[in-house]
Every structure is written in C-alpha cells, then in structure tokens.
Amino acid sequence: MPIASMFAIYFLFFFLCLFVVLPFGVRTADEAGVEKIKGQADSAPAHFSVGRTALKTGLIAAIPTGLFLLNYYQGWITRDLFDGVMVWLGAPQLPN
C-alpha cells in the first residue's frame, strides 16, 4: 500500500475520532464559574484547547489505523468471510 494511502486512511480515522472526542471534557461557562460574553450560547465551552484535542484525537486515531493496516497486510478479515454470511442470509452467490 502506498504511503499516501496510509495517510489518507489515517486522516479518515482522525476526523471520525475527532467527532467522538469533541464532547468529552467540555465545561460550559456556568460549570467553570466564568462570566459569559454577551451573545454566547449557554452550551458554548468556557475554554477550548485545539492543540490538546488534536493530540488526543491523533493518538486515538492511530489505534484503528494500525488495526486497519495490520488487517490489510495479515488478511484477518477478507471478502471470503462475508460470502458465507451472504449465503446464510439467502443472497445469491457472486462469481469469483
């Protein structure tokens, strides 16, 4: 697999994990005990660190990327595995 494809897969997992990580550890202005700015939404975070969130997301995204690449090279889960499931569901078999 080309290195550019590996980076593309990593960034797909990165942005998927980003949306999972974003809601954790966020404190609103009321919870943090700081004054709200005029027009600020009640649910807006009081303090948000882009760098820390990106670092956490990057480390978490490395895990599924590594598992994906290991599966790609080791062949743990292949198309043949799903052929048996499709037959069990009653779908017609596809030609090889």
Image (cartoon, rainbow, N blue to C red):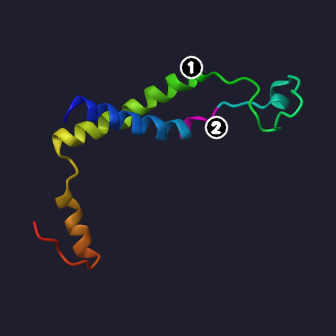
Q: Nearer the viewer, mark 1 or mark 2?
A: 1
Residue 11 lies left or right of residue 22; in this view the side is left
Is residue 82 shown above or below 27? Answer: below
Where residue 17 sits: x, y (%)? 49, 38
Q: Report the magenta residues as a range.
A: 20-24
Q: Which mark is residue 51?
A: 1
Residue 50 lies left or right of residue 91; in this view the side is right
User: Which quarter of the figure is the N terminus placed in?
Assistant: top left
Residue drawn 25% across the image and 75% down it = 88
Is residue 54 shown above or below 74? Answer: above
Is residue 35 shown above or below 87? Answer: above
The residue that label 2 is drawn on is 23
As measured in the structure, the alpha-carbon distance from the residue carrying label 1 to the one carrying label 2 is: 15 Å
Identity of the amino acid at label 1? Gly
Which secondary structure class fits the magenta region best?
loop
User: Which quarter of the figure is the C terminus placed in?
Assistant: bottom left
Residue 51 lies left or right of residue 45; in this view the side is left
Residue drawn 87% across the image and 27% down it = 36
Residue 2 lies left or right of residue 96; in this view the side is right
Residue drawn 17% across the image and 41% down it = 74
Q: Relative to the observer, which residue lies in front, 44 or 90?
A: 44
